[in-house]
Amino acid sequence: MKKITKAVIPVAGYGTRFLPFTKAVPKPLLPILNKPALQIISEEVVKSGITDILFIVGYKKDVLESHFLPAPELEKMLNEKGKYDYLEAIRYPETMANFSFKIQTEQNGTASAIGLAEEFAAGEPFAVLFGDDVMYHDGRPVIGQLCDVYEKYGKTVIGCKRVSMDVISKYASIEYDKVEEDKVFRMTKVTEKPKKEEAKSDLAPLGRYVCTPDIFDIIRGLKPGANGEYQFTDALDVQSRTTGALAYTFDGIRYDMGDRLGYLKANIEYGLRDEELGAKLKEYLKELIAD
């Protein structure tokens, strides 16, 4: 089975829940400690063995793009002052993968964003990572886990977690008719934001996918859903009932970067794992709670 070498990361939203910050800076550049969330997501891709990344961009494209381009003035200053650690840190995003950018001119849904990647995919299977979802796992990265499942079965793979049925209406719900193996389920349907009483499963997709290229034909045939938008979930639902798709419950922690509390959790937990900050932050949090 062909290895996955390409990833698509849609980041064309306006980031309204983080205004006024996102008036000037795109939400994917929100920092987790001193790294933009988008770089952490890109590192997940690269550590999984993927070499080519396409960003689907919109608002503030130039600011997003500049993080992955050389900064000669800054590099010169850091080099002259002997700040080689910082120099290495800012050069790494320039060389970590082969980057390309495509503009989504109309914000009309996630399926439309993915549809813009057809030329980039060039008939090959590809990974999809949504910019609102940062994943942490100290072993095989989450998207790499999905690639492994794809390479075994040759079907689209949707990364999932089990969630409480009390909150399933905030997500989508996946139905399945067969357990292929531990953590791998043969899908029969996926429903976007079902009512609690209508949801048939607590398996919810959480921002990581590996897709077979026939997804583009399905996207072209989609009808608009709520708010006149074309939803990626609807395309995956069609695929699960035609060429087939798998749900995989991945190992790892997901942080919702589209939510202010999720953003705070990411910073606190990454801070606690940080070699330099961890012990100091833990002590501070203990003192804070004690007060």
Image: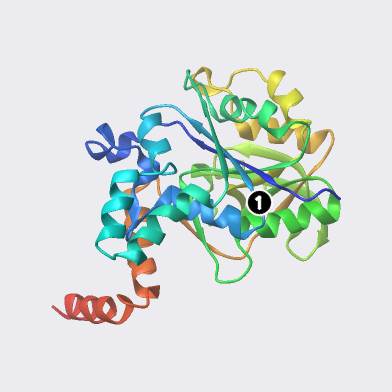
Q: Total of numbered circles in the picture?
A: 1
Q: Position of residue 176 (x, y in %)?
A: 76, 48
Q: Nearer the viewer, residue 211 or 169?
A: 211
State whether residue 278 appears in this view: yes
- Give the residue number, with chain letter if any, for mark 1: 50
Q: Position of residue 31 (x, y in %)?
A: 33, 53
Q: Position of residue 108 (x, y in %)?
A: 51, 21
- State the image quarter where residue 233 is shown: top right
Characterize the local packing of mark 1: few (<14), some (14-19) or many (20 or more) Cα atoms within 10 angstroms.
many
Left or right relative to 165: residue 90: left
Kind of residue at disc 1: Ile
- Give the secondary structure at mark 1: loop
Q: Is residue 257 above or below residue 271?
A: above
Indicate the colouring scheme: rainbow
Identified at 42% across, 31% down, the residue is: 13
State whether residue 163 appears in this view: no
Residue sitting at the far left:
291
Which quadrant does the C terminus fall into?
bottom left
Q: Nearer the viewer, residue 265 or 34?
A: 34
Q: Position of residue 65 (x, y in %)?
A: 42, 36
- State the image quarter where residue 111 is shown: top right
